[in-house]
């Protein structure tokens, strides 16, 4: 369960002013924890607090409720665009379609003078997407930015602005069965008694960055990936690490030449 998604849902339903928010650890890890700071609960029927009176005396702090709820709405938009991407499914992967989510959120409050009447703040939200090899990440990002700016104008009611930055853009990838990288790696793995058959991997790695630059790229490493990577009990056995070292050496010799 995505903890940020649950926190945003609570904030949306409660209407409580939000002083700060922090959740998630990495763009490609489903967040297990999210913490939001709110004032003491209101009495039943009390109107929604505004930014000038919901916190104790002292320099004003921003009410980030609207920004946080808008981040949640932008996740909804992001997921809808992922679900619309064609093709919608590839049976080689599990899950078969594009997936993603809001995996990191962190608030920022600007410093203000003690006599200021209001404060400005920001919510930094990191969205992740795992695309199929046929999907165009640049087109997806362009559609998202266009529609996201429209959403912010509507949902922010003039109180919000939005800046979007793509920090990593690695599309899904696929190699033909006769690719030299796959054939060479397969021979090396077969010599070690390992299964040389390549499989689809439903996660995002830096291999996609190399593939976008025209390099043949494949993912190989110790341990079990699917069902293990980015889970609470993710683990790799020492014996698997040692086996991977042998495999890396064999693959390098196979691809780069065994002589010299």
Image (cartoon, rainbow, N blue to C red):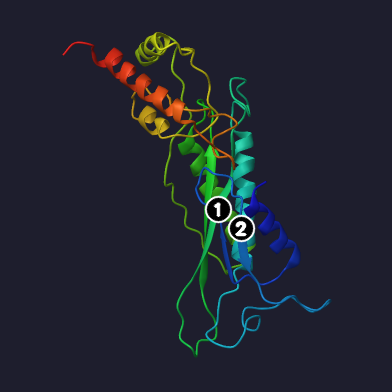
Q: Residue furthest front?
A: 239
Q: Are marks 1 and 2 in contact (CB under 8 Å)?
A: yes
Left or right: where 124 falls relative to 255: right
Residue 159 falls in image quadrant: bottom right
| Disc with the residue nearer the chain's start (1 vs 2) | 1
Q: Decide which of 135, 251 is in the foreground and name it.
A: 251
Q: What is the x, y in percent for residue 66?
A: 63, 66
Give the total number of marks visible in the rendering.
2
Residue 158 higher or lower than 147, as above or below: below
Q: In the rendered structure, find residue 34 and report the number of the disc placed on it.
A: 2
Image location (x, y in percent) of residue 179: 38, 12
Q: Give the Cα distance between marks 1 and 2.
A: 6 Å
Q: Position of residue 173 (x, y in %)?
A: 46, 25
Q: Residues within 10 Å of mark 2 (few under 14, many from 20)?
A: many
Q: Residue at x 50, y 48 (%)?
A: 26
Residue 194 in the image: above or below residue 218: above
Tell me: residue 205, above or below residue 102.
above
Q: Secondary structure at mark 1?
A: loop
* Residue 1 image label: none
């Amino acid at each position: 369960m995505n903890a940020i998604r649950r926190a945003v849902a609570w904030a949306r339903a409660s209407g409580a002013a939000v002083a700060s928010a922090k959740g998630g650890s990495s763009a490609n890890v489903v967040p297990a924890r999210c913490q939001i700071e709110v004032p003491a609960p209101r009495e039943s029927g009390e109107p929604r607090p505004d930014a000038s009176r919901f916190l104790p005396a002292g320099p004003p702090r921003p009410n980030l409720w609207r920004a946080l709820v808008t981040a949640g709405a932008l996740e909804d938009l992001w997921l809808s665009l992922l679900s619309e991407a064609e093709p919608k499914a590839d049976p080689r992967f599990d899950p078969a379609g594009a997936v993603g989510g809001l995996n990191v959120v962190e608030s920022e409050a600007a410093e203000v003078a003690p006599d200021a009447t209001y404060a400005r703040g920001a919510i930094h939200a990191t969205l992740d997407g795992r695309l199929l090899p046929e999907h165009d990440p640049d087109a997806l990002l362009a559609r998202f930015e266009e529609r996201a700016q429209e959403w912010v104008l509507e949902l922010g009611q003039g109180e919000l602005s939005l800046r979007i930055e793509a920090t990593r853009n690695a599309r899904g990838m696929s190699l033909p069965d006769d690719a030299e990288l796959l054939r060479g790696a397969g021979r090396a793995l077969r010599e070690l008694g390992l299964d040389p058959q390549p499989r689809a991997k439903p996660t995002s790695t830096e291999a996609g960055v190399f593939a976008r630059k025209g390099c043949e790229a494949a993912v190989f490493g110790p341990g079990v990936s699917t069902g293990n990577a980015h889970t609470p009990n993710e683990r790799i056995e020492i014996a698997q690490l040692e086996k991977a070292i042998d495999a890396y050496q064999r693959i390098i010799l196979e691809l780069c030449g065994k002589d010299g």
